[in-house]
Image (cartoon, rainbow, N blue to C red):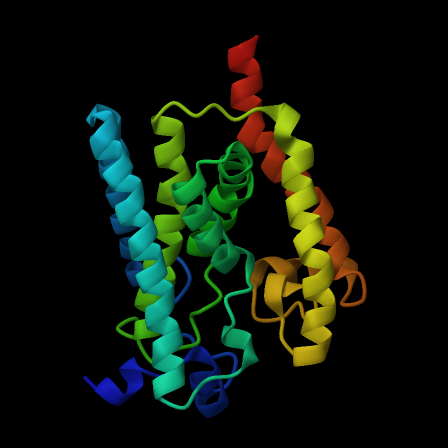
Amino acid sequence: MNMNNFWKSYALVEAELGADHMCYPLFGKIHLIELAVSALFILGMVLWYRRAAAGTRRKFLVAVTVLLLLDEAALLLDVALTGQWDWSYLPLHLCSINVFVCLYNTVFDRNWCKEELYALCIPGAALALLCPSWLCLYSWWSLVNLHSVSIHALLVLYPLLLVAGGYRPSPRRIPQVLAFLFGSALPIYFLNKTLNTNFYFLNNPYGNIITSTFTSLLGEKFYILGFLPAIALALAVMYLPWREKRR
């Protein structure tokens, strides 16, 4: 096993092997094992959390928050210490931003944080695990792959713990969720142009299965419009069970 390859970022591997290289196939054996381990971990933690006392639940959330921060820090230290840093590693993708939303909620306990994490973080992180955009690597045994799988699993876990602990999402808070999403996307769109980055996948549809699909349907010029029905569908899926329960 070549440990030099362990530290290489997907940008460096893509430059060396090409954008079409994949360390393992989508929904192949390794990917399915990663999904199964993530699902079992999340389920086990949620069941444990439900049975825990209030004080233990608080420690649970703090522990998950610390793991999220350490996970993100590991990637940043890797690319910084190995000379692979560029602006694309700023924690400004939606999932990276949600790490700090989790931190803010752990410290201040705000309903708007919980609502945003439930409505956007769960489907976004789950979709990233199902359709990962980090497969351009030498091997699954690399820091970037391990980081990407673990941090997205933790991002699914955190808001599920909130729901398991009694938080009840409300469709009335959807405007707050959309305000956060579009309010953050607008400055990031222009920041992408300045830094030549692609946070939120707003300035380049390639390298992501979902946005590539939007491009095939709508064309490269209008692929961003594909986010609108996708967001509407995600919100419908996330809130329909609660609406039916209220009825």
Residue 145 in sight in this render: yes
Residue 63: x, y in percent?
26, 48
Residue 23: x, y in percent?
36, 74
Q: Residue furthest top?
A: 247
Residue toward you, 96 or 104: 104
Residue 128: x, y in percent?
47, 55
Say above or below: 29 vs 173. Answer: below
Say above or below: 16 vs 72. Answer: below
Q: Residue furthest right?
A: 221
Residue toward you, 17 or 203: 203
Q: Residue at x 66, y 67 (%)?
A: 205
State the image quarter where residue 201 is shown.
bottom right
State the image quarter where residue 71 is shown.
bottom left
Q: Residue at x 40, y 44 (%)?
A: 107
Asked if residue 182 lies left or right of residue 17, the reply is right
Where the N terminus falls, by quadrant?
A: bottom left
Asked if residue 152 lies left or right of residue 113, the reply is left
